[in-house]
Image (cartoon, rainbow, N blue to C red):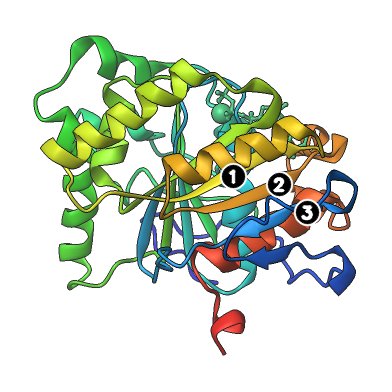
Amino acid sequence: MESPGAHPDQGPRTALPPLDSPPGDRLEVVTAWNADTPYQAWRPQILVPATFRQASAPRVFVVVNQKGGAGKTTSTVELAAAWAAAGYRVRVIDADHQEAALSAWLLPQYPEDSPRHSLRSVFFEDCTLAEATYPTRFAGVDMVPSGTDLQRVEYERPIGAEQALADALAQEMEEAGGRAPYDVTLIDAAPSLGLVTVAALTAGDEALVPIKVGGLDMKGMASLHKTIRSVQRKTNPKLRVGAVLLTAWDKSSFARQLAAQVSEDYPEAAVIPIRRSVRAAEAPLTEQPIRLYAPDAAPAGDYDQAAGVILPTRETTA
Ligand SMILES: Nc1ncnc2c1ncn2[C@@H]1O[C@H](COP(=O)(O)OP(=O)(O)OP(=O)(O)O)[C@@H](O)[C@H]1O
Ligand SMILES: [Mg+2]
């Protein structure tokens, strides 16, 4: 696939094939939880409430939760891989100055003999978003990398930083004659609600909130809620919460209560369990999405289904 970024493809890219998980492995999709199902008979289900509205391309998603280790980077990589496998042109943006785990996982393919840009350069207007976009080794997935120098945005606070990403996306679209160069943009936020995260939420159409089932922090959830509402009021009225992903999901009464709580907090969001698997933790070390490293592992299939619910793929709408 042609790379729409400023940098041409660097050699062959690995294809992300569709998954053919057996139907028995697919999660059931329901429109309401049935609280009467006895614990023994209860299985993980995807909740798609009647109030949920499916997204359409082009779409900018922000994967956000200020709690560390919630599954943001994993969700970004797997949803990107699922949408690319379905034929969408996908760009991921690493907005985490602390870890840059996304850049370490997907490895941007820098051209030789030219300066290396990153998201920081976009905030300081040293380059355009397209110039900071590089191919990855995976067909259909490009990325804007970051390094620890992204934290300069937090303490130098360049003028207009809150709007910088929204402006960069708008400018790029204008230069492309009103056409978005990517069908899907996924921003992997840092575990903080700092300036870069606010800029990401200001640029986004939709927030996707991963919550690790064992690592819930009610105070943290309340401040995320507050930040999203204040971005909606002040800088981005169109922002909505499209889905909550319950990551590293295991069957427990707590998981069930959490799902019920989350669907009350975000009544228009799809609530999607992503089952726990050690394969998920291993995948970054192999520098591949779980989808390629362990296509039979539950999270690969769950993220594939999640992608189809959040933004229907051509196959699911056909
Ligand atoms: N479905 C899963 N099953 C088991 N482990 C998982 C699953 N999803 C994510 N993990 C593991 O949980 C840890 C945290 O995930 P991840 O790095 O995606 O979270 P994060 O929110 O991006 O973290 P940070 O806030 O540090 O950026 C990682 O070790 C990851 O491999
Ligand atoms: Mg992360």
Residue behind label 2 places its C-beta within 8 angstroms of ligand 1: yes
Task: Relative to 15, say whether 61 is above or below.
Answer: above
Residue behind label 3 places its C-beta within 8 angstroms of ligand 1: no
The residue pinned by badge 1 equals 245
Residue 305 location (% of width, % of height): 67, 63
The amino acid marked with disc number 1 is Leu
Residue 240 location (% of width, % of height): 32, 50
Residue 211 location (% of width, % of height): 58, 33
Tell me: 81 left or right of 161. right
Q: How crowded is mark 3: few (under 14 residues within 10 Å), some or many (20 or more)?
A: few
- The numbered mark, 2 or 1, whose residue comes first in the sequence reads 1
Q: What element carries label 3?
A: loop
Identify the residue at image location x=16%, y=46%: 167
Q: In which quarter of the image is ligand 2?
A: top right
Quadrant showing the N terminus: bottom right
Q: Which of 114 and 213 is in front in this view?
A: 213
Tell me: 169 left or right of 297. left
Residue 204 location (% of width, % of height): 30, 48
Identify the residue at image location x=23%, y=31%: 123
Tell me: 301 left or right of 35. right
Identify the residue at image location x=64%, y=65%: 30
Q: Are the residues flagged by discs 2 and 1 in contact, CB closer than 8 Å?
A: yes
The residue pinned by badge 2 equals 274
Q: Nearer the viewer, mark 3 or mark 2?
A: 3
The amino acid marked with disc number 2 is Ile
Disc number placed over residue 37 in the picture, else none: 3
Quadrant showing the C terminus: bottom right
- The numbered mark, 3 or 1, whose residue comes first in the sequence reads 3
